[in-house]
Image (cartoon, rainbow, N blue to C red):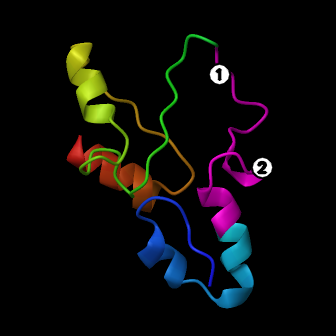
Amino acid sequence: MASVPGDWGTLYDSFLPDVRASVRDLLTPGNAGHRLHDQMDAQHADLILDKTRFSAFIGSSSGLDSLLRERKIETLIVSGTLSNVCCESTARDG
């Protein structure tokens, strides 16, 4: 069985074998499924972080906490595709 990067193993293991390859693509930096959608208006100066857990604030998941503290940012706007999973976890922990 192929592994996935970061701490996504438990999530990955919960999928049926026939969908694991596509899930691995979504979780692996550099793969087509992992990149930002083409219609996102990401600018060169934007900070883009990869995260390795449901919440961007858990341990060393993304470095978001220290980045926000260094910049004295106190307001978050959280968006994503699974509002009841990663978005909710990040908003709650933030």
Residue 62: give x, y in percent of width and height: 37, 41
Give above or below for 44 relative to 23: above
Residue drawn 70% across the image and 61% down it:
25
Residue that carries the numbered disc 2 in the rendered image: 32
Residue 42 badge: 1
Residue drawn 39% across the image and 31% down it:
77
Nearer the observer, 65 or 37: 65
Q: Nearer the viewer, mark 2 or mark 1?
A: 2
**Is 51 situated left or right of 3 in this image?**
left
**Is 5 situated left or right of 69 in this image?**
right
Q: Residues within 10 Å of mark 2 (few under 14, many from 20)?
A: few
Q: Secondary structure at mark 2?
A: helix
**Is 17 situated left or right of 92 in this image?**
right
Q: Residues within 10 Å of mark 1 (few under 14, many from 20)?
A: few
CA–CA distance between discs 2 and 1? 17 Å
Residue drawn 27% across the image and 45% down it:
57
Q: Which residues are magenta?
A: 24-43
Mark 2 is on which residue type?
Answer: Ala
Nearer the observer, 40 or 47: 47
Give above or below for 21 relative to 43: below
Name the main secondary structure of what is drawn in magenta: loop
Res 69 quadrant in image: top left
Q: Secondary structure at mark 1?
A: loop
Residue 51: give x, y in percent of width and height: 44, 47
